[in-house]
Image (spheres, rainbow, N blue to C red):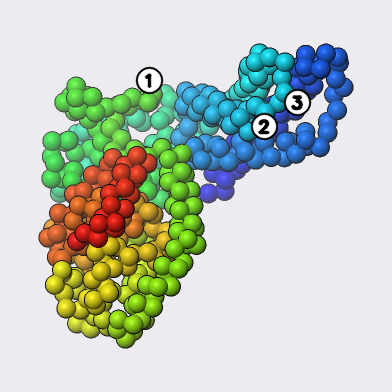
Amino acid sequence: MKDRRLQVAKYVLADILGSAAAWTLFYAYRKLQLEPLKFGHPVPLDFDANFFKGLFLVPLFWFGLYTVVGGYSDIYRRFRTKELGQTLLVSLVGVLVIFFVLLLDDEVPSTKYHYRSFLALFTLQFGITFPLRFLITSGTVRRVHDRRIGFNTVLVGGNERAMAIHQEIEAMRKSPGNRFIGFVNVNGGDQLLTNVGLPRLGKWHELRQVIDAHAVEEVIIAVDSGEHAHMSRIMNELEGTSVRIKVIPDMYDILSGSVKMTSIFGTPLIEVNPEIMPAWQFSLKRATDVFVSSVALMVLSPAYLILALLVKWSSKGPIFFRQERVGIHGRPFNIIKFRSMVNEAETNGPQLSSATDPRITPIGRWMRRTRMDELPQFWNVLKGEMSLVGPRPERQHFIDAITEIAPHYRHLHKVRPGITSWGQVKFGYAENVEQMVRRLKYDILYIENMSLAVDLKILAYTVLIILKGDGK
C-alpha cells in the first residue's frame, strides 16, 4: 500500500510541477511575444498577481482533471501507449477549458492571436507533462517486466490448459506481471499443477477465502470456455471481489473477436471484467448525484414538510421508515423512505407488499404510485450510499432467496444501488421473489450497458411515471 501511494505521489508531483512550468512559460510567451503584437510596443516580463493566482489554480485544475479521468488509478498496470493517448486527450480537453474560461475574452488584434495562444499552451502542457509521465510509466513497466513488481495470481483449474498457461507466462523474458501463488481445482483430478511446485489452495467454491487470505489481485480461469456451467458458477463466486478475471480462450473465442490484445508480447487472454464505464463517466455520474440531490433536498423542502404531515396524520408511527439494505460491494446501509405502511408492519418477519396489501395506508398507496415515498433517499445519495440510477437495493433476507434461484444476483453489487432503475421502471415494486428475479434481468442489462445516456433515459421515464401517477 505504501509503495502504491508513493507511485501515485510521483504522478501527482509530475503533473503539478509540469503544469506549473507550462503555465510559467506560457505567461512569459504571452508577455514577450503576443502582447507586443497587441500593444505595438515591447512589454516587460512582470510576474503580477494574476500570474501567481494562475500558478496556484491551474496546477490544481490539472490535478482534478487527471483524477476525474482515472489518471492516478491502476498505477502499476499502466502502459506507455495508453499514457500517450490519455495525456494527449487530457491536455486537449484541459487547454480547451482554460482557453474558454481564462483567455477567450482577451482583446486581440486578430483571431491569429487566439490560435497562437491555444497552440502554445497545448504544446507546452503536453510537451512537459507527457515526458514526465512517460518516464514514470516506463520505469514501472520495466519493473513489471523484470518481475520486481507482480500481482498475486491464482489459477482456477489444474488441468493441461492451466499447466500450459503457467509454463508460457513463467517462460516469458518480459513478465506480464503475474506472480503465481497457487491454484484452486475444479474437480478431484484437476491437480497437475502440483507437479511443477504450485500449491493447491482449495477448491473453486473457496475462491473468496483464498483471495482474502493471499491478497490475490488476478484470477486466470483455465477451464474450457465451453463448460458454461463451471464458468457461470466460478464467475458468480468471484462477483463482488476486486480481482481482475481472465479466461484462457479457445480458437472459437479468437475467431469470434472476443480476445483483445493489449501487449504484443503478452499471452492472449479474455479479460472478463473490464471497466463498466470510463472513469470520467463515473466521476461525472457521482458529481451529478451530489448536485441533483443537494438541489432536490433544498427545492423540495416544502414538499417534504407536506408529506411528513400527511404521513403523521394518516396513521400512528414515525414519519420516516428506515431499513437495512445491501449496497455496493455488499456493504449494508440504512435506506430512508416516507412510511407508507402501518407502524410495525413486519411483526411476522420480512414480507413483500402487493397492490392490495392492507398494511399500506391510503396516503402510502398514493405515495407508492407517484414514488413520493422514495424522496428521502436523496439523503442516501448525498451520503454516497446510493445513486440516482442503479439497481434497487434489497434486504439480505430476499437476496439469499434470490441467489438460490439466480446466483448472478451478485453482479448488482458492482455499482451503487439507485432511487430508480430500469427494472423499477419496467416492473415497479416486486410482490414476490419470482418478480424480483424477472426484474433482475433488466438490472443486469443496465449494468452491462451502463452509461450517462442510459441514466438520462431511465430518469426521464421515472419522471413520466411520477407525473402520471401510474407506478406499480
Q: Nearer the viewer, mark 2 or mark 3?
A: 2
- Return the x and y of residue 202 as percentages of the image width and height: 26, 53
Question: Residue shown at 52%/36% (left/top)?
Answer: 71
> Foreground residue, 136 or 458?
458
Which corner quadrant of the image does residue 471 belong to? bottom left
Q: CA distance from mark 1 to mark 2?
A: 43 Å
Q: Quadrant of the C terminus?
A: bottom left
Disc 2 crowd, CA 10 A, few/some/many (<14, 14-19, 20+):
few
- Return the x and y of residue 100 as percentages of the image width and height: 61, 30
| Residue 420 visible in the displayed image | yes
- Return the x and y of residue 353 as percentages of the image width and height: 18, 71
Q: Is residue 34 left or right of residue 253?
A: right
Q: CA distance from mark 1 to mark 3?
A: 42 Å
Question: Residue under circle 3?
Answer: 27
> Foreground residue, 184 or 32?
32
Helix, strand or loop under label 3:
helix
Question: Residue shown at 61%/36% (left/top)?
Answer: 62
Question: Residue under circle 2?
Answer: 102
In the rendered structure, which disc, 1 or 3, sits on the residue that comes first in sequence?
Answer: 3
Which corner quadrant of the image does residue 254 belong to? top left
In the rendered structure, which disc, 2 or 3, sits on the residue that comes first in sequence?
Answer: 3
Q: Amino acid at mark 3?
A: Tyr
Relative vertical location of residue 116 with respect to residue 459 in this rendering, above or below: above
Helix, strand or loop under label 2:
helix
Question: Residue under circle 1?
Answer: 264
Question: Residue shown at 24%/64% (left/top)?
Answer: 369
Q: Are marks 1 and 3 in contact (CB under 8 Å)?
A: no
